[in-house]
Amino acid sequence: MKKPFNEKSTLPEFPRDEVRAAIANGIKQAEEQKNMTQTPVQIKRKSKRKPLLYVASAAAAFSIMVGSAAYVSPTFASTLSQLPIVGSVFSNSGLPGLKQASEQGLTSTIGENHTINGISVTIDEVLYDDSNITVGFTANSEKALSKDYFGAGLNFTINGKNPEVASGTFYEKVISPTVHTGLARFAVMGKMPDSFEMGLMLEGKEGEKWEFTVPVEKIKNIIDVPVNHQQQAEGIQLDVSKISLSPSGIALDYKASEKGTIDNSQVGASFIEFRITDQNGKEITSHSGGGEGHFENGVWNFSSIKSFDPISNDVQKLTITPYLMLPSDGGGVQMDKDGIETKIPFDKSSLKEVKFQPFTVEVPKQTK
């Protein structure tokens, strides 16, 4: 069941009727101006924000976070641009996984609110599944807010500490001149606890800084399906270890490797995506995800968890087709173990198409 952040809270009642009236007055203008911003973000040990890549380093190997901004699901972006009301970012997102998880009571309803400089920010809802931590918030201001007022969006900590490697995507929607909603999705690589305290930090254009601490618990009804599929194509070694099924969606766990040099992280293995269809040929919408990579002994090694919409109860088999989502431009930042950063140029000529073989996975009967 959804749990309030603090049942004994004495915070003033949220002025929902006033907010909805503001939405009604401003939504037409917002739609005409198409006031939705899409800001890919990355999480780092330091608070500096970079345009494309998160990079971390272990003592033994150079590491880099890739892919979080190379591909953003068009469905994810377009549906968020049509959010009709405030206070229900998940259930009205148009994203089946968030909507279903919210309606089934799998998310945590937070409701923690702080007001700074006449801007009230409320953390509405949090979902932690096998691939992402998703946070929805609402901002209600006494004065008009500019588009992308909250910049790159939310930063976060786990039990008071910054994650070693994480990527994220943030969407800010202008509902009216004084009401904005935001949706942030974070992918954290490495072993994660099933429950923890999540610190959330949000900065405004005029120097405001909202800070929250919210309880987060991983949803329990997740079914892991071993895949253990391996194949090689054009020098890329691909290993899909498992998929996980839950009401919030499909999570696909994989690793890939390819020979290269430390000066060139733009190898095909860093751009792997997957297309999933059911036994009737219906495609399951992908929402991609970031990935971690490190260079060691002449080989680039990448790993990631890709997320997809949930499947219906009548799905019996999934066909998974790997492919490369090659970008037309890009670039990024690399960081060595001493924290020294170097810009990474983009060279499309170093990339080529690769044809992988599709494979099938039987859906366990207990998910039906």
Image: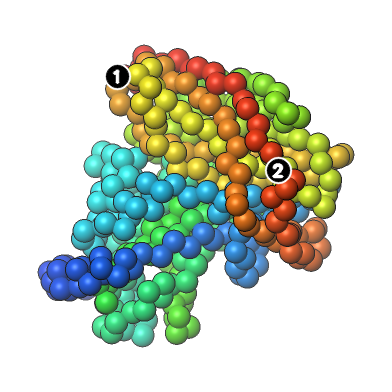
Amino acid under disc 2: Leu
Q: Which residue is drawn at 48% across and 50% down?
A: 72
Q: Look at the image and tell me in which quarter the C terminus lies.
A: top left
Q: Where is residue 32 in the image (x, y as percent from the top left)?
A: 25, 68
Between the residue at mark 2 and the residue at mark 1, the CA separation in whole angstroms equals 39 Å
| Percent of width and height locating residue 216 | 43, 50
Q: Give the number of the mark in front: 2 or 1.
A: 2
Q: Please, which colouring scheme is shown?
A: rainbow
The secondary structure type at the circle numbered 1 is loop
Q: Mark 1 points at which residue?
A: 314
- Name the residue carrying label 2: 351
In this rendered view, identify the residue nearer to me: 117 or 238. 238
Q: Quadrant of residue 29?
A: bottom left
Instruction: Say which residue appears at 63% left-offset and 57% top-offset.
Output: 330
Q: Which amino acid does label 1 sit on?
A: Asp
- Please state if 330 lies on the left or on the right of 106 as rendered: right
Q: Which residue is drawn at 73% across and 59% down?
A: 344
Q: From the viewer's perspective, is residue 107 above or below residue 143? A: above
Q: Is residue 353 left or right of residue 10?
A: right
Classify residue 88 by image quadrant. bottom left
Say left or right for 162 vs 171.
right
